[in-house]
Amino acid sequence: MIKDRDFVQSNLPPYASRKSNRELRRLLHLEFFKTDLITGIRSSQLVPYLFLYNPRRKKAEELIKVPGTFINSDIN
């Protein structure tokens, strides 16, 4: 798993830097559950570790930790 901050920043979608944490969580949820109905594979555009800046604690915190691809057993 890659935890390099530069890697994470370079792989964020272009709109991520302009969105609030709440909006990002909603977008991540939508990306996470996109399913390809033909292959039955859920593909995610997310990197394994995504860090969001928490202004209250003045540091970046890990928001989500997932592998990139999931098999949808209902379709297979």
Image (spheres, helix red, strand yellow):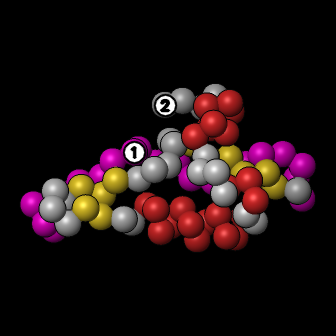
29 left or right, relative to 76:
right
Residue 46 located within the stretch drawn in magenta: no
Which badge, 2 or 1, comes first in the chain's sequence?
2
Of all residues, the one furthest to the front in this rendering is: 14
Residue 53 screen position, x and y as percent: 79, 51
In-front residue for pair 73/27: 27
Residue 67 screen position, x and y as percent: 41, 44
Mark 1 crowdedness (10 Å alpha carbons): few <14, some 14-19, many ≥20? few
Residue 68 located within the stretch drawn in magenta: yes
Q: Look at 68% across and 30% down and name the residue there.
A: 6
Res 37 seen here: yes
Q: Determine contact: label 2, label 1, CB under 8 Å.
A: no
Q: Which residue is mark 1?
A: 68
**Callout 1 secondary element:** loop
Decide: is 43 above or below 75. above
Nearest-to-viewer mark from 2 and 1: 1
Q: Look at 84% across and 45% down and name the residue there.
A: 59
Q: Which residue is mark 2?
A: 1
In-front residue for pair 64/11: 11
**Callout 2 secondary element:** loop
Res 72 seen here: no
In-front residue for pair 2/37: 37
Amino acid, disc 2: Met
Amino acid, disc 1: Gly
Residue 52 screen position, x and y as percent: 72, 51
Question: In the rendering, which numbered label is found on residue 36?
Answer: none
Q: Look at 77% across and 46% down and name the residue there.
A: 60
Which quadrant would the C terminus be assigned to in this image? bottom left
Residue 55 screen position, x and y as percent: 88, 56
Q: Which residues are magenta?
A: 56-76
